[in-house]
Image: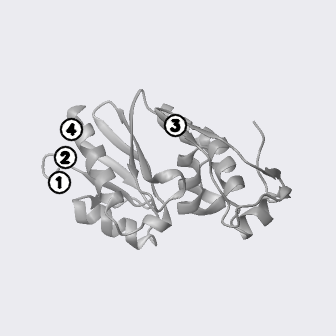
Amino acid sequence: DKKLHPASVFQDRPVAIPIKGAPDWYPQNFEKKFRGPMILKEALIHSVNTVAAQVVAEVGPAAVVDVAAFGPLWGFDVDAIAHARRATRTSWAGAVADSAAPAGLGGYAVCGVADDVGYLQRLAVHPDCARRGHGHRLVMAAGRWCQRQRCTSVLVNTGASNHRAMALYTGIGFVDTGDRLWVLELDPARGGM
């Protein structure tokens, strides 16, 4: 498993991307031509679709969404996403399709349960798909899953300066626990889920 960086070399060439349960996808460049070997930075600057599709196929659409949503410093790669799913004994993952995002994934969420507490461990929505209700749908689905697991509360933490996330969570019914990390809690029985 190679780590990607701006100088990673990819081949701009015809590619077939396998899609589970559907015919292979054959991405095309706008110019309908191929340039051969090129570094990733140049491919992305020039919107070379065949290279972008290879990157999505290599790292997975959820990792692409996560890095787009959180940036390279805080974005999760495929290993970090898998770790989030293993952080609790029982976990759930949900996704929202959106054709405006790379590989059609508009957003995803990971939720886990330990004892009677649910944890919304990760919520990422691709910036091209913001303000379409994807985050709300994913949080609500995670909350319903936590109810089925008989959770007495659901916790999520977010940066105090992340005003969109704070508005989303408090609008659903999460309340500030008073912790310095801004851990928010939701009682599923009272939270409108």
| Between 73 and 33, the one nearer to me in the picture | 33
- Mark 2 in CB contact with mark 3 (< 8 angstroms): no
- Mark 3 in CB contact with mark 4 (< 8 angstroms): no
Q: Earlier in the sequence, mark 3 or mark 4?
A: 3
What is the number of callouts on the image? 4
Residue 188 position (above or below residue 145):
below
Label 2: how many Cα within 10 Å (few below 14, some 14–19, many 20+) = many
- Would you identify the image quadrant in which residue 149 lies? top left
On the image, the x and y values in percent for residue 2 come to 78, 40
Residue occupied by mark 2: 188
On the image, the x and y values in percent for residue 183 come to 38, 56
Residue occupied by mark 3: 23
Residue occupied by mark 1: 191
Label 3: how many Cα within 10 Å (few below 14, some 14–19, many 20+) = few
Q: Amino acid at mark 1?
A: Gly
Q: Residue furthest top?
A: 89
- Mark 4 in CB contact with mark 2 (< 8 angstroms): yes
- Mark 2 in CB contact with mark 1 (< 8 angstroms): yes
Distance of mark 3 from mark 4, alpha carbons?
37 Å
Q: Earlier in the sequence, mark 3 or mark 1?
A: 3
Mark closer to the observer (2, 3): 3
- Would you identify the image quadrant in which residue 57 lies? top right
Label 1: how many Cα within 10 Å (few below 14, some 14–19, many 20+) = some
Distance of mark 4 from mark 2, alpha carbons?
6 Å
Secondary structure at badge 1 equals loop
**Residue 147's disc number:** 4
Distance of mark 2 from mark 3, alpha carbons?
41 Å
Distance of mark 1 from mark 4, alpha carbons?
11 Å
On the image, the x and y values in percent for residue 64 come to 58, 53
Q: Earlier in the sequence, mark 1 or mark 4?
A: 4
Q: Amino acid at mark 3?
A: Pro
